[in-house]
Image (cartoon, rainbow, N blue to C red):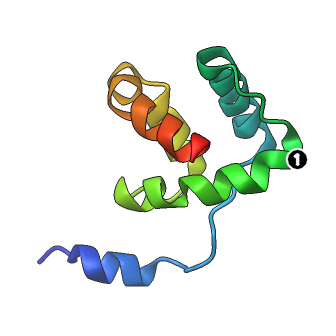
Amino acid sequence: MPESRTSRERARPSSMVSMNDKDYKRFSEFIHAECGIKLPPSKKTMVEARLQKRLRLLEMASFREYNEYLFSPTGLSEELGQLIDAITT
């Protein structure tokens, strides 16, 4: 019998997931190109915090997984609006 979503969520650590520097650089360059918003390395913690909810809702365990989804053709069309909302609010 497959695990329920609730038990999977309980199994995950409650601490925030972090983004490695390479993924953050790609991500911040993308946001700058799409929105004109500059996200220097000093904003990395803020970006990670704002995107935690998206990772949980998409049931992703890492920012690497999120970046792979975001930069795929399907992910970009489905996620761009959500991403911009998360970053700008």
Q: Where is residue 62, by image quadrant? A: bottom right
Taking the spot 52% from the left edge, 35% from the top edge, the residue there is 84
Percent x, y for residue 41? Answer: 86, 42
Taking the spot 32% from the left edge, 24% from the top edge, the residue there is 74
Element type at marker 1? helix
Taking the spot 70% from the left edge, 37% from the top edge, the residue there is 23
Check disc 1 and report the residue beneath it. 42
- Against 42, residue 36 (above or below) is above
Taking the spot 41% from the left edge, 25% from the top edge, the residue there is 76
Percent x, y for residue 2? Answer: 16, 73
Using the image as rendered, state which of residue 54 and residue 60 is in the foreground. 54
Percent x, y for residue 38? Answer: 78, 28
For disc 1, the neighbor class at 10 Å (few under 14, some 14 to 19, many from 20) is few
The residue at the far front in this view is: 89
- Against 73, residue 42 (above or below) is below
- Against 22, residue 36 (above or below) is above
Using the image as rendered, state which of residue 54 and residue 35 is in the foreground. 35
Horizontal side of residue 75 vs 71, given as left or right: left
Percent x, y for residue 60? Answer: 43, 55
Q: Amino acid at mark 1?
A: Ser
Horizontal side of residue 16 vs 66, given as left or right: right
The residue at the far top in this view is: 33
Using the image as rendered, state which of residue 85 and residue 29 is in the foreground. 85
Horizontal side of residue 76 vs 24, given as left or right: left
- Against 58, residue 67 (above or below) is above
Q: Give the position of the N terminus as an image quadrant.
A: bottom left
